[in-house]
Amino acid sequence: MAQMTAAEAAVHVLALEGVTQAFGVPGAAINPLYAALKKHGGIKHVLARHVEGASHMADGFGRAKPGNIGVCIGTSGPGGTDMITGLYAAAADSVPLLCITGQVPVAKLEKEDFQGVDIASIAAPVTKMAVTVKEPAQLPHLLQEAFRRMRSGRPGPALIDLPFDVQMAKIEFDPALYKPLPVVPPELSTAQAERVIDLIAGAAHPVIIAGGGVIGASAEPELVQFAELLSIPVIPTLMGWGAIGDDHPLMAGMIGIQTAHRYGNASFLESDLVIGIGNRWANRHTGDLPTYMKGRTFVHIDIEPSQLGKVLTPDLGLVSDAKAALVALTAAARDRIAAGGLKAGQFADWAESCQVRKRDVTMHRKTHFDQVPIKPQRVFEEMNKAFGHDVTYVTTIGLAQIAAAQFLHVYHPRHWINAAQAGPLGWTLPAALGVTLARPGERIVAVSGDYDLQFLIEEIAVAAHHHIPLVYVMLNNTYLGLIRQSQRGFDMDYQVQLDFDNINTPELPGIGVDFLKVMEGLGARAIRVQQPDEMAAAFAEACRLTDELQVPVLVEVLCERDTNIAMGNGLDSVNEFEALAQTPEDAPTEVIDH
């Protein structure tokens, strides 16, 4: 056995569990771990400008590729409390994220020592495991268990809190003998799969709801294979978007009361059997439940037993990993086809009727507006044309995010990365930096409103420092747009205005923050767009500059201040505040025809 500090043993465990990248902010209470990171090498580290930013970077890094686990490191006290929003965002969307904090010595716990706080108790509600390590010899094994829990069942984050003296203590640990704990996902039985096929055989208009669990399990090929076998239309959730490409003939469109397509809602309302796989029936997806459920039979398959029956009571609830479930369903369907109880492509006519809606121009929202200031719908039309099929979009919350989901297109798994349930303002920028580091050489485009960017805008300096290329499209309406729209119900427009006359930019009255100057001051570049026909050139130039300079480039689009984006309370009552498409000229640029 080899003797080393517990902090050094922790670094060995991180490397042996596959960690290659960490994000964080050092401090006195966590310096022993940083010393071990420096001594052993092999794990890259990015110094954030804010610990919350570091947690979102780690979150984005983890979401970007299968198997990634982002790691965020911070010191005691505020170093840990600043991570809580990051832990919440990861927990809400089932993302493994390991946060490691420094802590006062064990003897000082609960004695109100400087920056001594019970971070494990604070983090417990938003983690799968949160523990303050009090015995040095336990540290490698508690980390081992943290990785197992993060990967098991419904994935999620963990927090390991390390008192200073625990990190410094010498322990016996041999890295050559370390082995990650096994993760055994639950699987559908043959009988369970056959029961689902019974329901499918008796249906006329089945649909598959593909949730984030499909992407988390890397089950996208199995999803497409099963759907194609029987020609069942697929409706991805916001977290599942990209599990089947937007141009696939079985992709029926997203549904919901905000981030949805009109044709998707219309097709879902014609369905009679709903098979949810790896989804959680989020309220923005379902809208009011009576409308969502009326006249339909529900199957819910999820890796987490507590999800079954949480939001709606399924007619059949089954516990399984998404990949294992889809493999079992495909095998059972093939057996039923061989026995004559089903036909290959049985639901082709139903699937084609969904595609008819998808191709119907009048089922789309208008995007081709020529007004100045620019309408946000036009921004997304131009983005679709500029960035192509292989782009990855990163966003979090607000009218810009909702409109992005209504108008953009996603063709590959993990090419739409969104903090969907928590929606923390400020998440977009640091998460996009994490995604870009995880997938070098790929086109990553962040998109948000102006308020979201301001929350953690200092992380632009991190990207400039580390030469992280990122195109950031910001729709600047100098408003808290989503809150302004929701305030309509209260007959007010209060404390949501961000416009002011900037004394340094007199040529643009009401511009508020001059983002061009801010970006330049942080070591990046920016392009301001005021005319619709300037966007194509601006996006092309942003891509060129990003590739050439290896720094972020902001495209600031000055938008109409008070555009209302379609939303409502139920799938059959979405308010279309703006014009609908009437001709191919004013429809989205990709009304896909098969």
Image (tube, rainbow, N blue to C red):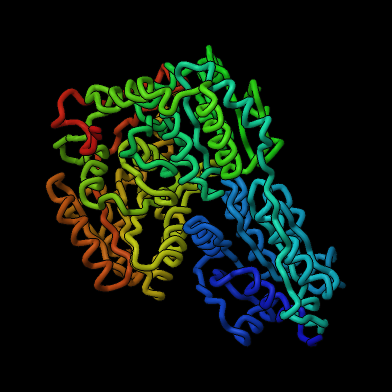
Q: Position of residue 179 (x, y in %)?
A: 72, 70
Is residue 458 in view from this perspective? Answer: no
Tell which of 560 and 591 is nearer to you: 591
Query: Which quadrant of the view contains residue 34?
Result: bottom right
Q: Is residue 393 above or below residue 246?
A: below
Q: Residue furthest top?
A: 295
Which residue is depicted at the point 33% across and 33% down? Answer: 249
Which residue is depicted at the point 62% across and 85% down? Answer: 40
Tell which of 21 and 458 is nearer to you: 21
Q: Position of residue 559 (x, y in %)?
A: 25, 43
Tell which of 442 and 453 is nearer to you: 442
Tell which of 479 and 585 is nearer to you: 585
Is residue 422 in view from this perspective? Answer: yes
Which residue is depicted at the point 78% across and 68% down? Answer: 141
Q: Position of residue 399 (x, y in %)?
A: 38, 38
Q: Residue furthest front?
A: 339
Q: Position of residue 474 (x, y in %)?
A: 31, 51
Q: Quadrant of the N terminus?
A: bottom right
Q: Is residue 222 above or below residue 19?
A: above
Q: Is residue 545 above or below residue 125?
A: below
Which residue is depicted at the point 73% across and 78% down? Answer: 9
Query: Which quadrant of the view contains residue 537?
Result: bottom left
Report whether 290 appears left or right of 411: right
How many numbered marks have been drawn onto this rendered protein structure?
0
Report whether 378 appears left or right of 231: left
Q: Quadrant of the C terminus?
A: top left
Report whether 552 appears left or right of 197: left
